[in-house]
């Protein structure tokens, strides 16, 4: 654990806990809360990248930063985080569970420990966070828990089986928590489902599918998602689907399943894979942190450029046959 006091604030700073705070959406959320003058508690497995993110938060104007290393998949570690925050600040105003991992590969190709690891971090991690945060919010009779899901929690996509299962589960958990906490109008459960976001998660993923993944267009910035999350602390009822494209995809999946099933695999190859980046099978960051790869943005470059390059490759392959 490490702590730094930074600039004083002229309004009441909130106590904001962010898991997955060393990279992507979580890191952008931590910085966004910091720039609003909040106390920011940054949680992930790798300390060094968390310390870097904490320094960015201090620069952005955080009332204070607190770095806590923990694996959200470990219930006791999550309990320790909540205890440490209460010892330090005495309250929890907002908790954003953004810790998440991905694996690529058909269901039967992903090794059991990796499959379980994705479910453990994404789904059981969300449950662990809820288990220890909700009682605090309920005893305060106020506060917000934000669960970061995905548009993939509403659909099926090729080669992302444990991720799909985990994200459907997070959506179910969010709905369940909403129901269970209806009696306290100032306790808010927010569920957010981004589409493609420009973060390192695609390179950090475990991969048994042969090619690196990439965010399909339209790609949002992690800062945009972070803004919507932090805005929801003051104005609850976050619009869960963050882009119109999500609505279109969900509509196709639910209303035109035969069309969806025919199109999804070729569209996934075209827009969600990087055919210029073949990869050997590897576990990525699913079982352990790879904190050197943690940063706010990914390195996939332009989504439309990637899509065009994939299209050229696919046409060339058809021409050669
Ligand atoms: N990027 C997208 O296109 C996209 C789209 C929809 C939804 N999402 C969701 O948004 C969330 C954040 O994704 P991102 O793209 O920002 O990913 P990212 O850049 O890879 O960041 C993931 C963060 O989670 C931490 N983490 C991973 N496993 C953990 C564990 N077991 N315990 C604690 N921390 C852990 C990582 O640090 P350590 O490895 O050091 O622990 C890192 O800080 C995820 O839930 C993801 O599913 C992302």
Image (tube, rainbow, N blue to C red):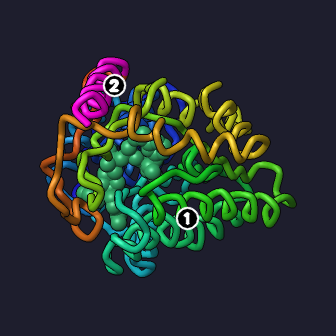
* Side (left or right) of 19 relative to 236: left
Q: CA distance from mark 2 to mark 1?
A: 29 Å
The residue pinned by badge 1 equals 165
**Rendering coords of residue 55 (x, y %):** 21, 38
Q: From this viewpoint, which residue is outermost toward the front?
A: 321
Residue at image point 42% right, 57% down: 159
Residue 116, labelled with which disc?
A: none
Residue at image point 59% right, 66% down: 130
**Rendering coords of residue 48 (x, y %):** 14, 53
Q: Nearer the viewer, residue 189 or 298?
A: 298
The N terminus - image quarter: bottom left
**Label 2 secondary element:** helix
Residue at image point 65% right, 70% down: 135
Provide the major secondary structure of the magenta segment: helix
Q: Nearer the viewer, residue 160 or 51?
A: 160
In the image, residue 31 sits, relative to residue 209, either above or below, namely above
Quadrant of the rendered image containing residue 40: top left
The C terminus - image quarter: top left
The residue pinned by badge 2 equals 311
């Amino acid at each position: 654990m490490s702590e730094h006091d930074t600039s004083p604030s002229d309004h009441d700073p909130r106590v904001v806990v962010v898991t997955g705070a060393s990279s992507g959406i979580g890191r952008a959320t931590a910085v966004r809360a910091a720039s609003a003058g909040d106390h920011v508690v940054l949680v992930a497995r790798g300390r060094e990248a968390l310390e870097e993110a904490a320094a960015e938060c201090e620069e952005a104007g955080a009332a204070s930063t607190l770095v806590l290393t923990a694996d959200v998949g470990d219930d006791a570690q999550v309990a320790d985080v909540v205890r440490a925050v209460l010892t330090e600040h005495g309250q929890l105003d907002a908790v954003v569970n953004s810790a998440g991992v991905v694996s690529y590969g058909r269901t039967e190709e992903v090794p059991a420990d990796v499959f379980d690891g994705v479910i453990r971090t994404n789904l059981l991690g969300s449950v662990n966070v809820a288990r220890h945060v909700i009682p605090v919010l309920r005893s305060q009779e106020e506060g917000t828990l934000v669960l970061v899901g995905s548009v993939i929690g509403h659909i099926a996509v090729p080669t992302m089986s444990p991720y799909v299962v985990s994200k459907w589960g997070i959506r179910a958990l969010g709905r369940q928590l909403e129901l269970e906490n209806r009696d306290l109008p100032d306790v808010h459960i927010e569920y957010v489902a981004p589409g493609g976001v420009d973060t390192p998660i695609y390179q950090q993923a475990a991969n048994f599918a042969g090619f690196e993944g990439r965010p399909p267009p339209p790609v949002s910035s992690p800062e945009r998602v972070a803004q919507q999350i932090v805005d929801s602390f003051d104005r609850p009822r976050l619009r869960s689907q963050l882009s119109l494209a999500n609505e279109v995809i969900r509509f196709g999946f639910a209303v035109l399943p035969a069309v969806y099933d025919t199109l999804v695999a070729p569209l996934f190859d075209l827009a969600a894979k990087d055919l210029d980046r073949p990869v050997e099978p590897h576990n990525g960051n699913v079982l352990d942190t790879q904190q050197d790869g943690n940063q706010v943005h990914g390195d996939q470059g332009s989504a439309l450029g990637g899509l065009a390059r994939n299209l050229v490759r696919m046409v060339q392959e058809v021409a050669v046959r």
